[in-house]
Image: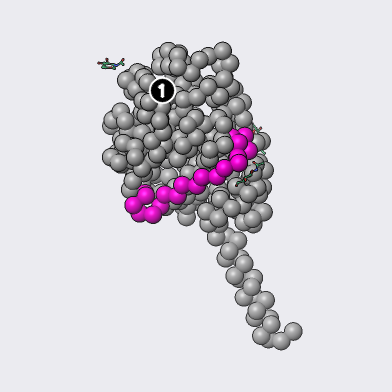
Amino acid sequence: MSVCENWAVIFTYLFLGTCITAYKPVVIIHGVLSGNITMLPMAERIKQAHPGTKVYVTDKFAGFSSLTPMWHQIQEMGEDLMKISADHPEGINLIGYSQGGLIARGILEQFPNHVVDTFISLSSPQAGQYGTKFLHLFFPGMVCHTAYELFYSSIGQHTSIGNYWNDPHHQGLYRNYSRFLPYINNEVLSSQSNTYKYGITKLRKLILIGGPDDGVITPWQSSHFGYFDDNEEVVELRGRKAYVLDKFGLKTLDKRGRLTLIELSGVSHYDWHTNKTVIDKYIVPFLS
Ligand SMILES: *[C@@H]1O[C@H](CO)[C@@H](O)[C@H](O)[C@H]1NC(C)=O
Ligand SMILES: *[C@@H]1O[C@H](CO)[C@@H](O)[C@H](O)[C@H]1NC(C)=O
Ligand SMILES: *[C@@H]1O[C@H](CO)[C@@H](O)[C@H](O)[C@H]1NC(C)=O
């Protein structure tokens, strides 16, 4: 081997070494009525594509305990995320699937000292949920238009899903009773409102993934922060008050080119986190 080739080998080692250590750790939060097991294939896929990546899959609130109120889950998982942050001051990336994406957003707002660089929200009801398919997963006999009677009560608020039930026909009750969604959206102002916004605007990238064949998130545009108006017509993200008034930083991110909306058809709600095309083409490339 010539001297020149030797140098090429050494250079390659150094270069790969740099690449391997360069991927930021990834934290993954699972959806409702599931647990860490469901997210392990995604974790493996990320490690295959980006060797050396540390991937943390939360083992908290699996199965029925995923119905624990949102703030409680956010507090516990947020403390874990802050411990990981402390170990990785260079930054981490965060992925939340379904309800897990809403928990993730709550963590970013409630723990504004986080070091999250990129947050990927994978088919999460970020603007809330108002649909029969979703409702019947938990309450098979319940009717969508009367569900508010349960959810907008102190008992109904003891479940995570009540915390982000957003009935477009009962917005007054929603604001008065919901203890979670109107707060993190800064629809109801609190002493925390500025902090909440700061936790979002400091992100380098916010990626929102969803699509029309989801079948569970209703309206599916909620995964992009779109939502029903009081005629049940969908208002897209950029037409909504939350965006126009920049209530919690979406417009700020968008103006800085930090917000990416991805719409994919042909993916059902139960397939997003295992679909290899979705992971390889729309998740992995954002994890640097
Ligand atoms: C998954 O979570 C359970 C607790 O819910 C835990 O006992 C187990 O070690 C976790 N497995 C992995 C691979 O993280
Ligand atoms: C919400 O609370 C306010 C203040 O207590 C009250 O005036 C209003 O009537 C309530 N709205 C509904 C729909 O309950
Ligand atoms: C996987 O995702 C692609 C879109 O990115 C979609 O066309 C395909 O139908 C999906 N497959 C499954 C099994 O969900």
Question: Percent x, y for residue 15?
Answer: 59, 70
Q: Amino acid at mark 1?
A: Asp
In-front residue for pair 222/3: 222
Left or right placement of residue 169 versus residue 90 in this view = left
**Does residue 119 show up?**
no
Left or right placement of residue 169 versus residue 63 in this view = left
Query: Which residues fall within the magenta stretch?
Result: 253-271
What's the residue at 50%, 50% (across, down)? 92
Relative to residue 180, is residue 214 depicted above or below? below
Q: Which residue is mark 1?
A: 167
| Quarter of image, ligand 3 | top right
**Does residue 171 show up?**
yes
Question: Percent x, y for residue 153?
Answer: 41, 14
Question: Percent x, y for residue 152?
Answer: 40, 16
What's the residue at 37%, 49% (across, down)? 254
In-front residue for pair 240/254: 240
| Disc 1 packing (10 Å; few <14; some 14–19; many ≥20) | many
